Amino acid sequence: MADHVDRILEQWKAEKPDLDVSPMAIIGRLSRAALAVDARLANTFARYGLDASSFDVLATLLRSGAPYRISPVELARDAMISTSAVAQRLNKLEARGLVSRQANPDDGRGTLVALTAAGRKLIETALLPHLETERAITASLTVEEKTLLAALLQRINDAARPLK
Amino acid sequence: MADHVDRILEQWKAEKPDLDVSPMAIIGRLSRAALAVDARLANTFARYGLDASSFDVLATLLRSGAPYRISPVELARDAMISTSAVAQRLNKLEARGLVSRQANPDDGRGTLVALTAAGRKLIETALLPHLETERAITASLTVEEKTLLAALLQRINDAARPLK
DNA sequence: CCATAATACCTAAGGACTTAGCAATTGCTA
DNA sequence: TAGCAATTGCTAAGTCCTTAGGTATTATGG
C-alpha cells in the first residue's frame, strides 16, 4: 500500500536518518488529497460549463436562501479569497447573465449580487451531480470514519491558523 | 465548536432540507485545512526568501541524495505539475544560482538539474524550521490520531483519483 | 533500417489569483 | 459635528499555473 508520500518519506529517511519527518506523512497527504479532490470535482463542474470558482459563487448565493442576494464582501469571506478576486469572478458571471449586480439601498458603498433566473436554474441543475461526486469520493468511509476525519481536519485547520 | 463549514451546512439544511450534504463536511474541511496549512508553511518559507514552489524543488533535489541531480521530468512527476511549470521554476532558481542545468550524457533530449553549493546550503538551512512548522501543525494529534488521519487521507486520495 | 510515434524540454499565451492603489461612502471619536 | 479612519468595490500589474505548440532526440515496428 506504499504510495507516493511513502516513497518520499523513505528518501528522507535515507538522506537524513536523524530527522523526524513523520509530520510530512500527514501534510503531504493532505495537500495531495485536496489536489485530487479538486481535480475530480472539476470534472463534474465542467459538465455544466462551470469551474470551481463559478460554482462556488452560485452555490453560495443559492444556499443563502431567498432572495438569493448577498454582497461581494460576504462572498469573499465565504470563499476565503480577496474582494478583488470576487470582483473578477462576478465580471465573468455577470457577462454570462448568471448573476446581476445592483446598488445596496442601505449602504452607498455597497453592491448586492443576485442570482438571475438563468443562474438559479444552472446551479440547481449542477448541485445534485456535484453532491453525487462528493458522495462517491467519501463513500468508502464508514459513518464513524467520516465523523472522525472531519473532526481531525478541523483540528489541523485550527492548529494551522494562528499565524497569518 | 461550530466552524465555518458547520455554518455552511446549516444554510444548506435550511434551503435544501431533503439533500444529504454530509459529504461537504469532509470535502469542505479538507480544502480549507489544505489552504490554512499552505498559508502557514508559506510564512516559514518566506523567512528564507523562498516560496512553496522553490522549496519543493530544492527539497526534492536534496532528498534524492548525492549527487543531488535529477531530471525536470522527475521533478514534474514528483510535484504533480506540468513540465512547463518545472521549466519556469528552474528558470527562476537558476537565475538565483540555486540550481544549475547540465546536459544529460545518457540522453540527448534530457537535462539534469543539480543543486549548487548555495542551493544546498539554503535548503539545508530552511529544512529544519520547515519541519518544526509541520510538527507544530500536527502537534495536537496523538500518535494514533496521526496514523489514522494519514490513512484516511490516503483513502480519500485513492477514491478521488479514478477519473481524470 | 527507416518512418512514425513517443519522450524531453522549452517558450508563448491565457486564466485566476494576489497585492497595490484609487474613489466613494460610512463610522467613530475628540 | 468635523475630520480621520475604516469599509466597500473596483482596476492594474505581477505571479504562477495551465494548455498549445515547437524543436530535438530516442524508441519502435513493419
Image (cartoon, coloured by chain):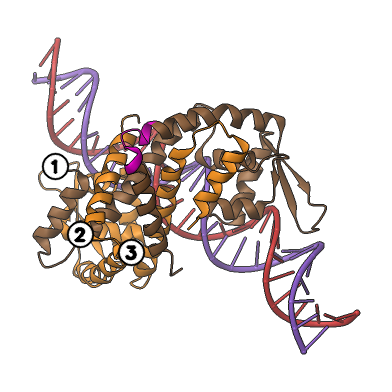
Chain colours: A brown, B orange, C purple, D red
- Distance in Å between CA atoms under marks 2 and 3: 12 Å
Q: What residue type is labelled 2?
A: Ser
**Front one among A66 and B162:** A66
Stretch in magenta: A136-144
Residue at image location 32% in from the left, 37% down from the top: A142
Q: Where is residue B146 in the image (x, y as percent from the top left)?
A: 25, 55
Q: Which amino acid does label 1 sit on?
A: Asp
Give the x, y percent position of residue A64: 64, 43
Q: Nearer the viewer, residue B49 or B8?
A: B8
Tag 3: amino acid: Ile
Q: Distance between the residues labelled 1 and 2?
A: 36 Å
Q: Which chain carries label 1?
A: B
Q: Is mark 3 on a helix, strand or loop?
A: helix
Cβ atoms under marks 1 and 2 closer than 8 Å: no
- Within 10 Å of disc 1 (Cα), the crowding (few <14, some 14-19, many 20+) is few
Q: Mark 3 points at which residue?
A: B137
In magenta segment, residue B76:
no
SS for tag 2? helix
Residue drawn where x is 55% and y is 38% of the image:
A55
Residue at image coords 68%, 29%? A118
- Residue, disc 2: A22
